[in-house]
Image (tube, rainbow, N blue to C red):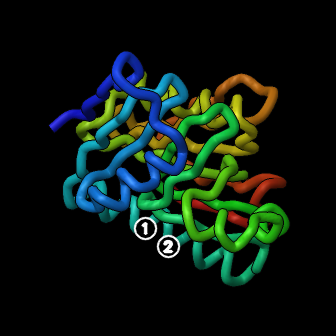
Amino acid sequence: MNTVVLNLEPVAHITDEQFYQLCMANRDLSLELNASGELVIVSPVGGESGNNEAGLITDLEIWNRQSKLGKVFSSSTIFRLPNGANRSPDAAWVSLERWNALTPEQRKKFPPLTPDFLIELRSETDTLKRLQEKMKEYLENGLRLGWLVNPQNQQVEIYRQGQPVSVLALPVRLSGEDVLPGFELQL
């Protein structure tokens, strides 16, 4: 199954609250809403991709438990970006300072912020172009560091504020740089 995009704007504009209610009423679906108001139904991943995603989240969480610098989120978490998009990266991290600035209600629903760091892992059902566009959208909305892991092409794309995208061949050891001090990931 491929990702499905439904253009709802000719019929209705979905508010943040309506999108939240739609997601709660359809918990078996993985939904996103892009800045153009299109509803994106994201395909489920297979066993290998799911296992790889779990490994990335685990490594990030282990580092975070030691550093105590922020909060780690899974692919089930939707972030409400400043441009109005509601996106869900495969793994994400938000600094404690930014997380604590949210109200309890904002933390409970879809946090209205862009993660400081995130990872997108390309699965068999993802097109590279769609994920690259998503990474650029995250950057435009305040992402500080992002990794697009592409097992199919055996490479990782590194996205940083104000810099061109770096493309590295796998295997590689990635650094969390100044965003995640001391975090390293062997891919």
Q: Is residue 157 above or below residue 103?
A: above
Question: In what element is the residue under mark 2?
Answer: helix
Give the side of residue 146 with respect to residue 51, left or right: right
Q: Position of residue 46 (x, y in %)?
A: 20, 54
In the figure, 18 relative to 156: above or below?
below
Q: Residue at x 58, y 74 (%)?
A: 61
Question: Is residue 65 rendered to the left or right of residue 3?
Answer: right
The answer to which of 67 and 72 lies nearer the viewer is: 72
Q: Quadrant of the N terminus?
A: top left
Residue 60 in sight in this render: no
The CA distance from mark 1 to mark 2 is 5 Å
Tell which of 2 and 32 is nearer to you.
32
**Mark 1 packing: few (<14 Cα in 10 Å), some, or many (20+)?**
few
The residue at the point 61 percent across, 27 percent down is 136
| Amino acid type, residue under disc 2 in the picture | Thr
| Residue type highlighted by circle 1 | Gly
Residue at (31% x, 64% y) in the render: 51
**Residue 140 in the image, given as x and y percentages of width and height:** 70, 29
State whether residue 14 is above or below residue 112.
Answer: above
Q: Dots 1 and 2: beta carbons under 8 Å?
A: yes
Residue named by callout 2: 58
- Residue neighbourhood size for the residue with mark 2, other residues' Cα within 10 Å, grouped as few (<14), some (14–19), many (≥20): some
Q: Is residue 86 in sight in this rendering?
A: yes
Depth order, front residue of 135/49: 135
Image quarter for residue 144?
top right
- Spot the residue most to the left: 1
Residue under label 1, please give it: 55
Residue plotted at (25% across, 31% down): 4
